[in-house]
Image (cartoon, rainbow, N blue to C red):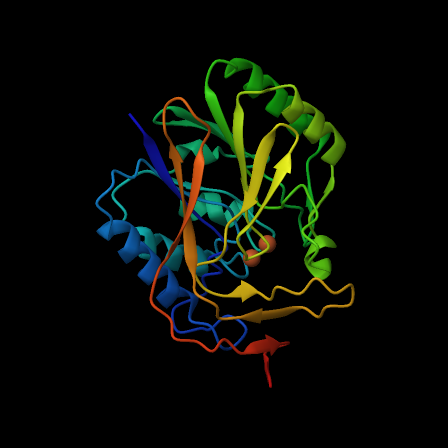
Amino acid sequence: MSTVFVQLSDLHIRQPGQLTYRRIDTAAYLKKAIQSISNRQEHISAVVITGDLVDFGRVEEYGHLAKLLEPLSMPVYLLAGNHDHPVHLREVFSSHSYLGTQGPIQYCVDIGSISLVALDTSVKNASHGELAADQLAWLSHVLDLNKDRSVVIAMHHPPFLTGIHHMDQQNLKVGNDSFKQLIAQHKNIQHIICGHVHRPISIQYAHTVASIAPSPAHQVALDLMPDGPSRWLLEPGAYRMLTAIPGQSIVNHMAYVDSFDGPYPFYENGRLID
Ligand SMILES: [Fe+2]
Ligand SMILES: [Fe+2]
């Protein structure tokens, strides 16, 4: 039997009534995504949210997020991104026991036939990501325990370059080589799912596939020029649907959450670009 689970990423929820970058009603976009997930006919085993859950790590923002997530009937697994605050996240989501009570927010849970291993790449007061030696040791231990299972690794910061330079400057900066070595040693790792870059992107990584999910709200502009500015736009929001079909590797679908006519103007520093 197939296992299907959803990956949402980069929700950037603010307090009720406040807009991200003064323009984006991220809560409205998340509501649409949750409606879309709830309306699906497939059995969705879980929803995994790969960080930047809220915009400023505030308790009120996590409270708003908790309310928005209420309609989801399946287990929801939360990861920390660079916009998150681990103490406030754990405080508001205290019923999510997998989050633990201290240290990095890292855990391993079963989702149907999959073992999901969630890592915490966030660094206090920084945009980039890191994996410390003790986190890599924990990962090695968990991978050994799950060597007979299909494993998916989830992490906010991608451990690879995308060619979008202003985002590549804040990807995983510490622990990359050791992480890649660990991945290469475990051929049962089926997929590495990331967030942070707000675009659908994928790459071969060691023997496996690493991918990034778009946001259900704002996307980062596709601009591969070395001096490309940091711009976002309201291209269609989306989420991933990872599908484990017995006898083959995982299929990674992308589902749009709404219908869109375009055009999609660019914004830079909150300013509309002609
Ligand atoms: Fe983000
Ligand atoms: Fe991020």
The correct choice, above or below, for 177 with respect to 128 in the image is above
Q: Where is residue 132 in the image (x, y as percent from the top left)?
A: 71, 33
Q: Which of 250 and 138 is in front in this view?
A: 250
Q: Residue furthest front?
A: 248
Quarter of the picture for ligand 2? bottom right
Residue 42 visible in the picture: yes
Quarter-of-image position of residue 187:
top right
Quarter-of-image position of residue 176:
top right
Q: Position of residue 49 (x, y in %)?
A: 45, 46
The correct choice, above or below, for 263 with respect to 169 in the image is below
The correct choice, above or below, for 257 with respect to 85 in the image is below
Q: Which of 127 and 274 is in front in this view?
A: 274
Q: Which residue is drawn at 52% across and 61% down?
A: 55
Q: Which of 176 and 273 is in front in this view?
A: 273
Q: Which of 224 and 34 is in front in this view?
A: 224
Q: In which quarter of the image is the N terminus?
A: top left
